[in-house]
Amino acid sequence: MRTLKNTLLKLAGGAALSAMAIGHSFAAEPVWDANTVELELKKIGKGVYAVYDSRADDMAGKGVPMATSSGIIVGEDGVMIVDTMMNERLNKQLFSLVKSVTDKPVKFAVNTSFHGDHSYGNYFLPESVTVIQHSNAKKYVDSHFENDTQFMIQTFGENRGIEDVKASTGDILIAENGQINVDLGGRNVLIKDFGFAQTGGDVFVWLEEEKVIWMGNAIVSEKPGLPWLLDGHLVATLNTLQSVYDFLPNDALVIPGHSYPVDKSDLKWNIDYLTDVKSNVSNAVSKGYSLEETVKSVTMNDYRGYALFDWVHPGLNIPSAYKDLTQH
Ligand SMILES: [Zn+2]
């Protein structure tokens, strides 16, 4: 447990790694196995599909971590996919799902962050696909790819196809606070940086007509899942989630990084949690508590239910919040 805590403190200090990978590094078994999970498709609107772990229909809401989500957006001229998966197997599954709904070619792929389970699949894309990601995501991959894959193998297991991946980054880069519109032919997609969400290289994909947003790991899943402050920045993350919440209409559909489509109330759950973390940790800091005392006192048992609560809350989020709130 001490090693776990040290790892998390180190993570909170700067290294950026996949949330699901972290979960696994403390579990005896992978939280999900990239060799066995199956993806399924849910039609959201004409030519718009959410893709997610097929176990979600039974297991969502139970706080169990699931595979990376994705999306398929079909325009008259071609298709955009959201996130490219961790290995060739899942990338191919995603392409099979595309084929099951349209003959049009995949023209664009978006990475909601650099996390390997959202972007390693770039390497398996045909040359003709244009990859869109945040400029900070590219920067991270350009300088950390070797370490990142080592970590992913260590945590997701060997022979999960990660060994085959080579660094492959974006063709179109979104600058900090930037956004672009992509016209797929009769369908306009907004890809936007709302601010620091989990990695500092996060983008969101928004379809105005269908009122659907892909959020990547900014929210991992529905209630009782919790956000992971892997790179710290509690206050910035909270502000970003609030900006997204304010941007969205009340009946918006929200696709988390690792579950099936939910609604704004699940985004609110994440915001409420971080708001309570902020006020409780601020309170502890104002009393002069040490990090250890803060972790011990800010238990927030009302938010229990997530399978990874005992790692993510005391081990990661409270130390990240403490660091963030004592730096300002
Ligand atoms: Zn992820």
Image (cartoon, rainbow, N blue to C red):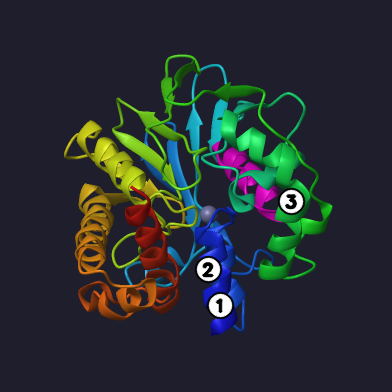
Report the side of 43 relative to 5 (left or right).
left
Closer to the eye: label 3 or 1: 1
Is residue 102 visible in the rendered image? The answer is no
Identify residue type, mark 1. Answer: Leu
> Counting other residues with Cα less than 10 Å from the Cα at mark 2, is it few (<14), some (14-19), or many (20 or more)?
many
Q: State whether residue 151 is above or below residue 218.
A: below
Identify the mark nearer the N-term, 3 or 1: 1
Contact? badges 1 and 2 (CB < 8 Å): yes
> Counting other residues with Cα less than 10 Å from the Cα at mark 1, is it few (<14), some (14-19), or many (20 or more)?
some
Q: What residue is disc 1 on?
A: 4
Q: Residue at x 65, y 34 (%)?
A: 139
Q: Is mark 1 within 8 Å of ligand 1?
A: no
Q: Position of residue 314 (x, y in %)?
A: 38, 74
Q: What residue is disc 3 on?
A: 88
In this picture, which residue range is highlighted in magenta? Answer: 82-100
Q: Position of residue 67 (x, y in %)?
A: 53, 61
Contact? badges 2 and 3 (CB < 8 Å): no
Q: Main secondary structure of the magenta part?
A: helix
Identify residue type, mark 2. Answer: Leu
Q: What residue is disc 2 on?
A: 8
Label 3 secondary element: helix
